[in-house]
Image (cartoon, rainbow, N blue to C red):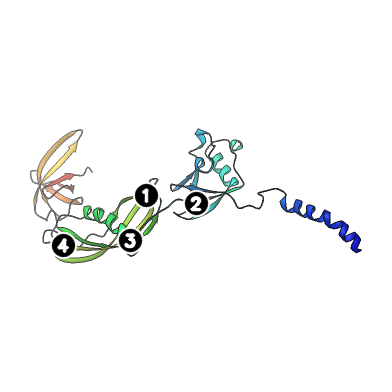
Amino acid sequence: MSRRSSGAFRPFALPLLCALLCTAPGAGAAPGEVEVQGAHIELGEVWKDAPEDYREIDLGRAPPPGASRLLSRAAVLRQVKAAGFDPAKVKFPPSVRVRSAAKQISKEELETLASPAIARSLKRGVELKKVSATRGATLPPDAVLEGVDMPKPPKRRGAYRTSAIVKWISDSETVARIPVSVTLYITERGASADVEKGANITLVVERKGARLTARGQALTSGDEGEIIQVRVLKTNKVLRARIDSEHVATVEES
């Protein structure tokens, strides 16, 4: 090709190249990003113009707090159809990046929040001395502390170290289980059972709206909330009863 012909071609080459690169704007663009709040993605969060009756369609679990994942149109339409709605009415891009909102809790905040819940779970005579966390946590913004799981302390007076699991929920689901170290002090009262074997207690029988009581004797030891065997003093009948306090137990229906 001569210089002349090459030069003549150049004015047409640039527009052609531009046309090739600029065709279908957005085709190579990154998908849009949407932030969701709960443990599950609702259609109304990722499709802002969704009809009212479509907005609460569950599209599945959201990413972990602070993380993201791609949500494809195909996946959305499958969930809409599975929920009994018409997928043809859904206007959704090829994909959307879904990011879960998050709140950060420092280990100091975790210790402060967990301490009252742990203290409430202890029986009388067991004192909470210290709660220690090794790390903070990343949680959904609406996560709340549901409770703690902790082994029952021994019937032994003195200091005792153990661990507990602090449970957080969001959308009625457990979203985090965070371990903490716990230091307790077990007093003489805490080292003994709430109801000792051989103790006399009041037995409560609730039947058809009526509340009856009888005197009984514990055949096994136990703490509040536990079920023990008891003997009705008047009839010598052996029953199972749940301990309500050190003086009262409710008979379990067989």
Q: Which residue is mark 3?
A: 107
Q: Which residue is mark 2?
A: 99
Q: Quarter of the image for the N terminus: give it.
A: bottom right
Q: Secondary structure at mark 2?
A: strand
Asked if one can make out residue 43 in the rendered structure from this viewpoint, the answer is yes
Q: Amino acid at mark 3?
A: Lys
Number of residues whose C-alpha sits closer than 10 Å to that of mark 2, classed few (under 14), some (14–19) or many (20 or more): many
Q: How many marks?
A: 4
Q: Which residue is mark 1?
A: 143
Distance between mark 3 and mark 4 Cα atoms: 26 Å
Distance between mark 1 and mark 3 Cα atoms: 16 Å
Vertical arrangement, residue 19 with respect to residue 5, above or below? above
- Residue 129 lies left or right of residue 65; in this view the side is left
Distance between mark 2 and mark 1 Cα atoms: 16 Å
The tag earlier along the polypeptide, 2 or 3, is 2
Q: Secondary structure at mark 3?
A: helix
Q: Which residue is mark 4?
A: 186
Give the x, y percent position of residue 143.
37, 49
Q: Residue at x 12, y 50 (%)?
A: 246
